[in-house]
Image (cartoon, grey):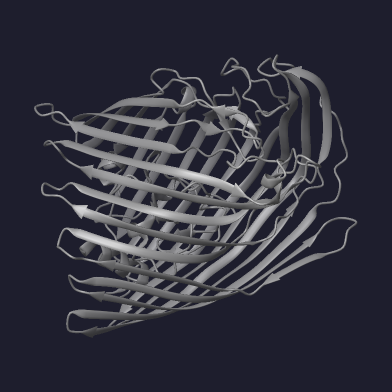
């Protein structure tokens, strides 16, 4: 019950959050509350992440928050200013007003503690790509905290491609009076020479033959270069029975140089035609924010909260105008450098979205009995797409959306809940291999039903389980004409579970599992153009993590992270699938002091068995799964 109340207070405008200035103490396993999804620093665990929640992308659905406040993401929030990211579904999202289907992705930025700390981390990265990260957390008196952050990254990928990144940013927090916190931040990154490994599309959609990893078979000139940034301001205040939470954000992602490489029609011998799409000035920029006002009314054991919220976003995207370079026949996995052609890019498509949402909500918390959340939202959505040499396509929608959730507490240890949510989401753009590459896809209405339970066992163990039913329009390649368009409706019915606790002193353990039954229905399935199972989904995924501090070895701990996924549907016809696979990571930490400086030595071996595998994306494109690699880092908090 206290955790539900904490989530309610934070989401409704409370500014308090634990100070976490030292990087040497970060440990995802020990900080995660459940197995649904958590990242701290550079490490992540859980069955969900921003790109896949209950089989869908929460990021594409627009379900992003910065410290509980709505934020429309055009660019990833810089990792150097982000302390942790949490995926919230079911009961863990209960305290968040006006939730959306496909979960919530909430980002917590870094925060200065009571003492100044300068953290320096040197990380080998995947495949010995070297990273250097510096974070200065500086308190000024008791009411001002500043974080200054920078990172240099030389990333190396399983495909043999590489990229260079410079990340930078800062956060300033001010508490002018008790109960009020003001936050301003800026986070950006620049990237250059980020090579693009080809995506593989086979002739019949079947899984490609294995290839040699860490051997780049793209084109050295087919890379990305550009920059991205996010900046904004947040205000949270508790003024007696009133609470205010507000935020305004600007997010921009620009690729000054853009290439997409892919192989089409690859046969059983690995031979297909090699293509590169080339363009420039591909940009997406979004201005967004939220203003939320709530009033708390206490009535004995009952606490009522009334809230009103206004959310808005203004998105401007410029994309397309891509020139196609046909490089001829080539074999996947085999380097085959070709001279850079000089294709002429065309005019770009203009895609402008304006959306405003006005909402009212009611929350009831009845001590040791129940919690009730109700919300009603009116959304005004407008999307104008201007394709060169074509008429303007204008789409408008003004739906009523709603959410309702009820949690019952029959005992001090047991919580039961049911919930339903309606949402309006964007569906992105068509992929590069479609006959309509870059085409804007229409907004879609979604709905979700769910029910679940959480039980707190003696000894600190906690189990959470839920069943859910989500429905959305389904988009994929139409085999009749190659266009990426709506082909039916996709429904995800499934169950998820999490178990966390400490069975032994010094041992922390978290296990998450999701069972999924995804199905596509509609005319395209009835006609046999696509199968009933959507591409890229697996019926079973398990994620388990343990961290053990060995008694008698001060500062030393070992950890393991294991994942298992069942067969994953690999093509639209449902005639191919990726085999089931299990991946094991092993690691260790050693915390000590050099003089008075806390230090951390971290070593991890990922994919210990060097399991080979492919990943499959929407449209049936294949990319490589990372193999075995050793990652080591040294962190010091000065």
Q: Which quadrant of the figure has residue 171?
A: bottom left
User: Residue 445, image x and y in percent?
Assistant: 59, 63
User: Residue 114, image x and y in percent?
Assistant: 24, 56
Left or right side of 421 for 143:
left
Residue that protrudes farthest toward the right in the picture: 389
- Residue 497 shows in the view: yes
Q: Which quadrant of the figure has residue 26?
A: top left
Image position of 12 with respect to 482: above or below: below
Image position of 314 with respect to 575: above or below: below
- Residue 638 shows in the view: no
Left or right side of 537 for 498:
left
Report the quarter where the N terminus lies.
bottom left
Residue at image coords 25%, 55%: 454
User: Residue 391, image x and y in percent?
Assistant: 87, 63
Residue at image coords 32%, 59%: 91
Q: Which quadrant of the figure has residue 453?
A: bottom left
Question: Front-most of 363 and 340?
Answer: 363
Question: Front-most of 443 and 355?
Answer: 443
Question: Front-most of 112 and 368?
Answer: 368
Residue that protrudes farthest toward the front in the picture: 526
The tally of labels here is 0
Report the quarter where the C terminus lies.
top left
User: Residue 452, image x and y in percent?
Assistant: 32, 57
Residue at image coords 76%, 41%: 434
Residue at image coords 30%, 26%: 587
Image position of 35 with respect to 146: above or below: above
């Amino acid at each position: 019950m206290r955790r539900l109340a904490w989530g309610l207070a934070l989401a409704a405008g409370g500014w308090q959050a634990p100070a976490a200035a030292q990087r040497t103490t970060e440990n995802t396993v020990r900080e995660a509350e459940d197995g649904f999804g958590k990242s701290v620093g550079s490490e992540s665990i859980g069955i969900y992440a921003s790109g896949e929640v209950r089989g869908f992308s929460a990021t594409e659905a627009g379900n992003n928050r910065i410290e509980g406040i709505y934020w429309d993401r055009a660019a990833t929030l810089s990792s150097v200013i982000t302390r942790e990211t949490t995926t919230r579904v079911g009961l863990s999202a209960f305290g968040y007003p006006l939730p959306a289907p496909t979960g919530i992705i909430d980002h917590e930025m870094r925060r200065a503690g009571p003492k100044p700390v300068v953290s320096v981390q040197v990380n080998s990265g995947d495949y010995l790509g070297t990273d250097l990260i510096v974070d200065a957390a500086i308190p000024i008196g008791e009411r001002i905290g500043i974080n200054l952050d920078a990172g240099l990254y030389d990333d190396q990928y399983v495909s043999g491609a590489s990229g260079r990144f410079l990340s930078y940013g800062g956060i300033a927090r001010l508490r002018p009076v008790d109960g009020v916190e003001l936050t301003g931040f800026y986070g950006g990154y620049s990237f250059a020479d980020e090579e693009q490994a080809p995506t593989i599309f086979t002739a019949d959609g079947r899984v490609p033959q294995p290839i040699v990893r860490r051997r780049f078979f793209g084109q050295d000139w087919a890379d990305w270069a550009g920059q991205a940034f996010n900046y904004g301001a947040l205000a949270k205040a508790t003024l007696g029975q009133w609470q205010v939470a507000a935020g305004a954000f600007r997010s921009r992602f620009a690729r000054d140089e853009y290439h997409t490489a892919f192989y089409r029609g690859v046969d059983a011998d690995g031979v297909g035609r090699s293509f590169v799409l080339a363009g420039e000035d591909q940009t997406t920029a979004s201005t967004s924010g939220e203003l939320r006002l709530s009033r708390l009314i206490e009535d004995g054991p009952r606490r009522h909260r009334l809230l009103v919220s206004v959310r808005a976003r203004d998105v401007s995207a410029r994309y397309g105008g891509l020139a196609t370079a046909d490089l001829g026949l080539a074999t996947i996995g085999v380097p085959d450098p070709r001279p850079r052609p000089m294709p002429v890019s065309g005019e770009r498509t203009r895609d402008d979205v304006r959306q405003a949402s006005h909402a009212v909500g009611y929350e009831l918390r009845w001590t040791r009995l129940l919690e009730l959340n109700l919300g009603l939202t009116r959304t005004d959505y407008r999307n104008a797409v201007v394709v060169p040499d074509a008429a303007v396509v204008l789409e408008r929608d003004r739906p009523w959306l709603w959410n309702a959730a009820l949690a019952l507490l029959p005992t001090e240890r047991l919580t039961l809940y049911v919930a339903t949510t309606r949402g309006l989401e964007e569906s992105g753009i068509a992929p590069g291999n479609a006959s309509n590459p870059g085409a804007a896809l229409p907004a879609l209405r979604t709905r979700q039903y769910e029910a679940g339970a959480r039980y707190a066992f003696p000894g600190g163990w906690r189990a959470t389980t839920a069943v859910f039913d989500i429905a959305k329009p389904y988009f994929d390649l139409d085999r009749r004409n190659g266009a990426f368009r709506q082909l039916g409706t996709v429904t995800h019915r499934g169950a998820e579970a999490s178990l966390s606790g400490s069975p032994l002193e010094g041992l922390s353990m978290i296990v998450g599992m999701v069972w999924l039954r995804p199905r596509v229905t509609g005319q395209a399935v009835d006609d046999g153009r696509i199968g009933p199972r959507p591409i890229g989904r697996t019926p079973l995924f398990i994620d388990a993590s343990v961290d053990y501090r060995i008694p008698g070895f001060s500062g030393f701990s070992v950890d393991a992270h294991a994942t298992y996924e069942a067969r994953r549907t690999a093509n639209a016809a449902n005639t191919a699938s990726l085999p089931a696979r299990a991946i094991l990571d092993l690691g260790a930490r050693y915390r000590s002091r050099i003089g008075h400086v806390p230090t951390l030595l971290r070593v991890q071996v990922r994919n210990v068995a060097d399991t080979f595998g492919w990943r499959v994306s929407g449209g049936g494109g294949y990319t490589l799964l990372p193999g075995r690699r050793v990652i080591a880092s040294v962190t010091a908090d000065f």
